[in-house]
Image (cartoon, grey):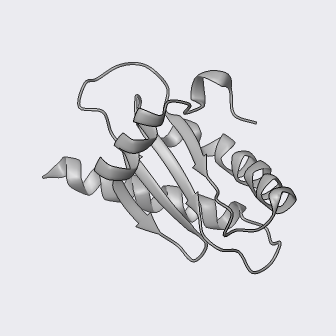
Amino acid sequence: MLPIDARLTSSSDFARATKSGIRVTTEHFVGYLYISPVTNNASAKCGLIINKTVGGSVKRHRLARKVRHAVSPHIVELPLGSLFVIRALKQNDDKNVAPEISTLIQKLIERSKKIEAR
């Protein structure tokens, strides 16, 4: 479970991350990472977008729980003050999402470091 201060709740923050953030796509997820230009010591915030194309309510909520559980140990790896959004794409089966989420986060971190190095 994500701590309360690590949850993304504002629609403007979701929009900022998805429109202005770095984007990485895997087979079942799209990840967005927006790094705030203002340096603050707030922890990274994470939000989920899981729409009806994924499946019914039970399937969406089950997937959301799995994704939150997979993101929880990696939230400290993200830059301070960043906004992280995961959009779930259509899922064919009920599988373990942790390795894919871990890969997604690592790719986003690598890409953000490349951009900062410029």
**Percent position of residue 105, x then y:** 51, 55
Q: Residue furthest top?
A: 41
Q: Residue at x 23, y 31 (%)?
A: 37
Q: Looking at the image, which residue is at 52% across and 73% down?
A: 26
Residue 29 on image: x %, y %: 57, 66
Residue 54 higher or lower than 39, as above or below: below
Residue at the extreme bottom of the image, as rendered: 92
Could you say which is closer to the camera, residue 13 or residue 97?
A: 13
Q: Which residue is outermost to the left? A: 118
- Closest to the observer: 100 or 8? 8
Q: Is residue 72 above or below residue 97?
A: above
Q: Is residue 90 left or right of residue 115?
A: right
Quarter of the image with the N terminus is top right
Q: Is residue 90 left or right of residue 15?
A: right
- Image height of 13 relative to 39, above or below: below
Where does the image place residue 93, in percent across and percent down from the top left? 80, 78
The residue under the point 18% across, 50% down is: 117
- Residue 67, compared with residue 54, is above or below; it is above
Q: Position of residue 97 (x, y in %)?
A: 72, 65
- Lateral position of residue 12 relative to residue 10, left or right: left
Q: Residue at x 70, y 53 (%)?
A: 67
Residue 5, quarter of the rendered image: top right
Count all numbered tags in the image, as a single digit: 0
Name the image quarter holding residue 36: top left
Seen from the viewer's position, the closer of residues 47 and 38 is 47
As drawn, the residue found furthest toward the right would be 58
